[in-house]
Amino acid sequence: MYFNFQDYIPMKEITKICCIGAGYVGGPTMSVIAKKCPHIQVTVVDINADRIAQWNETDLDKLPIYEPGLKEIVAATRNKNLFFSTEVDKAIDEADVIFISVNTPTKTYGKGKGQAADLKFIELCARNIAKVATNDKIVVEKSTLPVRTAGAIKNILDNTGNGVNFEILSNPEFLAEGTAIQDLLHADRVLIGGDETPTGQKAKDLLSQVYENWLPKERILQTNVWSSELSKLVANAFLAQRVSSINSISALCEKTDANVEEVARAIGYDSRIGSKFLSSSVGFGGSCFQKDILNLVYISQSLGLQEVADYWEQVIIMNDYQKRRFADNIISTLYNTVSGKKIVFFGWAFKKDTNDTRESAAIYVADALLEERAELSVFDPQVKEQTIFRDLDYLNTRSPEENKKLVTVVDDPMDQVENAHAIAVLTEWDEFKSYDWQKIYDKMLKPAFIFDGRRLLDKVKMEEIGFNYYRIGQV
């Protein structure tokens, strides 16, 4: 379809969508759009041929992303109106709408190092779209981006393209990993930001029509592009703030007779506060919270708002403190030395029901224990061995050879507890609660310790079995 934005034309339905980036956002989002919009052809493209091959796997258990409900949707739509391909230019050329859903990591170099978002992949996408496009396109920011990125994309497209017209929209995702499919199917809101011009409004309405295939129109909010971009950062910052707030209280609870779970329940009944994101743990992880807060800190500093930057940076400081405090407690409890001691990790993903390990608390707790020469044995039902070693190697704390010498990854949790000094619960997988903990206790060295970083297990039951049981936010 040819969109002529410069002239008034009646609204036309979108028939072809291209998504650049087959990751944690692009794959699930496009799968749901394909499921709910059978009249739209959806093509997800990526230059990573291995990742595309995984999306095209006959065995749906081998999809690159684990999300409850995802494989069923892929099975129903793939090769019908949902396609995964490495033919990036072809998909761009044919699409009416192009979603950009590539990685925007925190910069590790230069100005803004450690805080600002690295936009090199976004810029590469924009330049490729400009080179390939021969007719008017709607380009949608799906990646989490700093405020005013849309302007940069627009500038690249308008000055390097083939004379075609582009409308840039911001359509941030508000997905929680582990519940992404349900979050897409039953979204609280969809946010579409764009220029407040006749052509910008037209583009926003066209994208809104896609979501209106399964969501009530009143849940689809339209804003200017700057408000949309900032809203994503602020939403994650507010949620992370709640987690760090309750985690700060967990440290206080451990020094008194208070129970952080009871405190959270008491304040959660206050209708002004609510109960969500008040579960204390070893710390938040994932690809969004830390990255988005650091981005907000950098933006605030860039605009001379140092007090605002300091305020939000404290959320990150508290999260780092919680992870460090958990590791320190393991070391001090095990008689101030873990050298040569076998410590078992139950869980590596940053939360249950996902195989994503980005910024997982387990990585940093492991790193602290390995610095003390502990010997770690790791089990996670969805995370592969290569991912665990990749996460540790990325820190550059020690050589890959040293990591492999000190860390063992197993496929059966019962295989790893023999002669273990302690177990650390780092991910709240439901299956951990159903394990035969008496059998686990019998296999461990005595005294046998459990450090529950997710408050997952029954304290009374564990202590009745004989464990020395410690959990976040409770004596």
Image: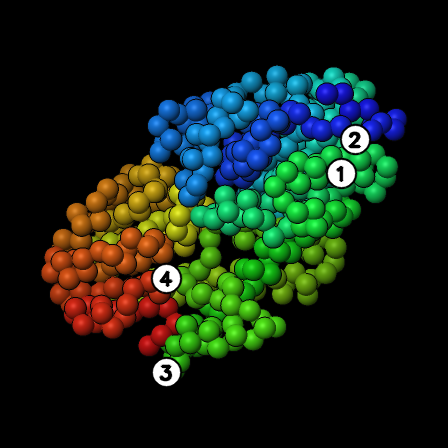
> Which residue is the site of mark 3?
257
Quadrant of the image occupied by residue 335: bottom left
Which residue ends up furthest to the left in the rendered image?
442
Q: Amino acid at mark 4?
A: Arg
* Marks 4/2: CA–CA distance: 50 Å
Cα separation, mark 3 vs mark 1, equals 56 Å
Expressed as whole percent of the image width and height from the top left, the position of residue 226 reads 75, 47
User: How has the structure been colored for display?
Assistant: rainbow
> Mark 4 against mark 2, which lies toward the viewer?
2
- Which amino acid is tagged 3? Asp
Q: Which residue bears the numbered disc 4?
A: 454
User: Which of marks 3 and 2 precedes in the sequence?
Assistant: 2
Cβ atoms at labels 1 and 4 below 8 Å apart: no
Q: Quadrant of residue 432?
A: bottom left
Left or right of 184 in this view: 471? left
Q: CA distance from mark 1 to mark 2?
A: 8 Å
Q: Which mark is residue 417?
A: none
Question: Could you tell me the amino acid type at mark 2?
Answer: Met
Q: Which mark is residue 205?
A: 1
Q: CA distance from mark 2 to mark 3?
A: 64 Å
Q: Residues within 10 Å of mark 3 (few under 14, many from 20)?
A: few
Crowdedness near tag 4: few (<14), some (14–19) or many (≥20) residues, C-alpha within 10 Å = many
Disc 1 residue crowd, few under 14, some 14–19, many 20+, Cα 10 Å: some
Upstream in sequence: badge 4 or badge 2: 2
Quick one: SS at disc 4?
A: loop
The nearer-to-camera label among 3 and 1 is: 1
Return the residue nearer the eye: 14 or 142. 14
Disc 4 + disc 3, Cβ < 8 Å: no
Kindly identify which residue carries mark 2: 11
Asked whether 217 or 425 is in front, the reply is: 217
Q: Residue at x 24, y 54 (%)?
A: 344
Residue depicted at x 46% and y 73%? 265
